[in-house]
Amino acid sequence: MINHENLKNRIQLYSQTTFGSSFEELLDTEKYVVLSKALMENVLPLWTESRNALAGKRRAFYLSSEYLMGRFLTNNLINMGAKEEVEKLLDEMGIEYDSIEESEEDPALGNGGLGRLAACFLDSAATLGYPLDGYGIRYDFGLFKQKIKDKEQVEEADNWTKFGDPWGIRKVKETVLVAFRGSEIRAVPYDYPVIGYGHKMINTLRLWKAESLEEFDFKAFNDQNYDLAVKAKNDAENIAKVLYPNDSYEEGKKLRLKQQYFFVSASLQDIVRRYKKENNSIEGFADKHAIQLNDTHPAVAIPELMRILTKLEGMEWNSAWKIVKNVFGYTNHTLMAEALEQWPVRYYEELIPQIYEIIQRINYMLLEELAGYGITHDQFHKYEIINNGNIRMAWLSIYGSKSVNGVARLHTDLLINQELRDWYRLYPWKFNNKTNGITQRRWLLQSNPELSSLVSELLGGDEWITDLAKLKELERFAWDEAILERFRGIKQLKKSQLAEYIKYTEGVDIDPGSIYDIQIKRLHEYKRQLLNALHIIHLYFRIKEDPELDIHPRTFIFGAKAAPGYIRAKGIIRLINDIKELVNNDPVVSNRIKVVFVQNYRVSYAEKLFPAADVSEQISTAGKEASGTGNMKFMLNGAPTLGTYDGANIEIVEEAGEENNYIFGLRVEDIKAIGDTYDPKEVYNNNPNLKRALDSLVDGTFKDDTGVYREIYNSLLYGADWHRPDNYYVLKDFEEYRLAQEKIDRDYRNSIEWARKCWLNLVNSGKFSSDRTIEEYSREIWSIEKI
Ligand code: 26W
């Protein structure tokens, strides 16, 4: 498919014209840029063809402030079906592909689950042939890079384009202007190809860069006012400068509001402009477009589309509203109250007054509608979009959309029965569930080629790559010991590879014969890394008092970034690193258990961790994790879940069997039932193991010069002024967690039985392909057809 001579010539040409020397002499990062640029030529024809095929068709757009795409090169090569060819070609030139692959900066334009979900969705839509394009922000700096220094998280800027951005095409001609009060900003699009697996369709991810209308004020410069000379430029560029590092905590920063309006306005103007090129009237807009709001971050799209339709297109308010209500869908990704966006009215007035006016009118319309339903004034506060000086973005999103969905069954049930109960009563037809999924292309085919080969061999083909439900046909091999042995061998290999990488990146020696027990996700109290940590402390003391303790060696691996302002989360990172020092440096204990904290957890690190896992830690407080998607990546790579009845864990064990997983702890109904009667001190006083572990936070076991361990200890036993003691039931769930861990320790020793559990997880993971999720969105919300 790829003409070798041609590609080689292009590679040499780009090497010379871009970096001034031959390809062989370039740095790996430069080789990456040159190779990618050269490959673009193989992408363009299909990309153009795919765009042309969209003319007149109904299409969907995904608006998201975050995309965690992961590295492009390998993924694009695999999806183009050209990876082996290119590897061979490089080999002929005496160049190793792997080091080029590893030199690519991992673009971290997202925080966690929400951003990675967006990336999986784009991959699935392009693969299945659905017309779904993404819109977002081309941040100059992605999520901070994390280093651990003296046990603590240190943040560094992530200049992800410093060696170039070969997959992004700057389309200056399609620049649009975005108006804020008193200033206009240029939004310049960068297009990234989203190549479907099998290379049959290429969709587009369009990310906007913020630029200034005026580059430079010459007069100010002449007057030696250098800062002023570039002020307009800096102010404009600051809008897309950096991704806000908060995940599930809303901070209400003006610049963040500017980011939201900036990319939303640019995207909608772009969509409308394209539509008008093909159509002479805007009336039919809703028939041709579905726009999905990835959480409320792009919710300002609702009043912005109203503005465009009424003020620019001259439509009547009511006809415009009909269109708006038929175009948008809203996905909710969290039940955490502190993550629900509310913007102070004064920010809107100050930055985008033209939009605030429209929101006010939408709010009046809502109240009139409520009155029409016979809802009395004293009930209005439950629904008001503008309430108490704030704009409630979730309320705006629900009112202005035709569909509202949660991301796992439990999550949607909780939305309907609790958080959004009042809205559900009003518009039951809007509510629906779309359980999340992940793309098997990146999370199995790419990250675990060895297991992929075994799967293809046993299935006699590779249809599973685009039809994950096929895996179910492999269920019968769960009783074939020869196959289970091969499966075990692959896991062993992935564990050795990870051990080598961890040695290289973290300098820690780990034993591939130990159980790899992995918890990788953002650091948050509700995710309860602390529960895991306390249990390790407990094991430490157990081994100290009984060095002969009969346990299988275990390696506890953590990866997590904390929001820079989240003090307690940072304290937990420090604690884990303190435990790591204590455990790994103890000659008796370190032969039995080890602790690793992988620095700068990100997509490319994740690709090495999931395939090597023996145990998947999914231990959030029941009712708090909307879905989780890491849980699915572990399952797909054959790791049983140690988890609570929360998010998608419930559906995972429903598919794979409870007997093949380790479920423990309080359920949503239990938490409801114990309510205010819960007293963590009682639990603490009655459980010596727990008491000993928890006391270590304050008894000098760890040096606590900042007092953060004392603060964590107090938060569990006494609470804080903003929450009750042990708000996340860490102490309450400790004993059941410990017992579940003991069971894992016993079960793991029967290696065939264990392999069978792992296998049954793998073969039952079909439901969790994002292909399935995208099919559901396409059919039930977007009403789009495959091209
Ligand atoms: C405004 C601050 C902020 C930033 C991000 C608040 C909330 C968010 C996201 C909604 C947090 C998030 O990523 N949620 C995760 O979404 C995943 C994809 O649906 C789910 O699998 C995770 O359970 C959920 O935590």
Image: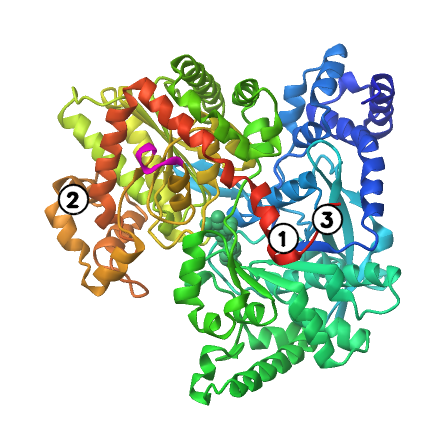
The CA span between labels 2 and 3 is 56 Å
Task: Say whether disc 2 or disc 3 marks the residue closer to the N-terminus.
Answer: 3
Amino acid at dot 1: Arg
The crowd level at tag 3 (other Cα within 10 Å; few <14, some 14-19, many 20+) is: many
15 shown above or below 679: above
**Residue 229 visible to an observer of this rendering:** no
Q: Quadrant of residue 402?
A: bottom right
The CA span between labels 1 and 2 is 53 Å
Residue in the foreground of this view, choosing between 389 and 462: 462
Q: Which residues are magenta?
A: 656-660
The crowd level at tag 2 (other Cα within 10 Å; few <14, some 14-19, many 20+) is: some
Amino acid at dot 2: Lys
Amino acid at dot 3: Pro
Mark in the foreground, 2 or 3 = 3
Q: Main secondary structure of the magenta part?
A: helix
Label 1 CB-ligand 1 distance < 8 A = no
Helix, strand or loop under label 1 = helix
Label disc, if present, on residue 36 of the rendered structure: none
Residue 380 is left or right of residue 526, and the answer is right
* Residue 131 part of the magenta-drawn span: no
Q: Quadrant of the N terminus?
A: top right
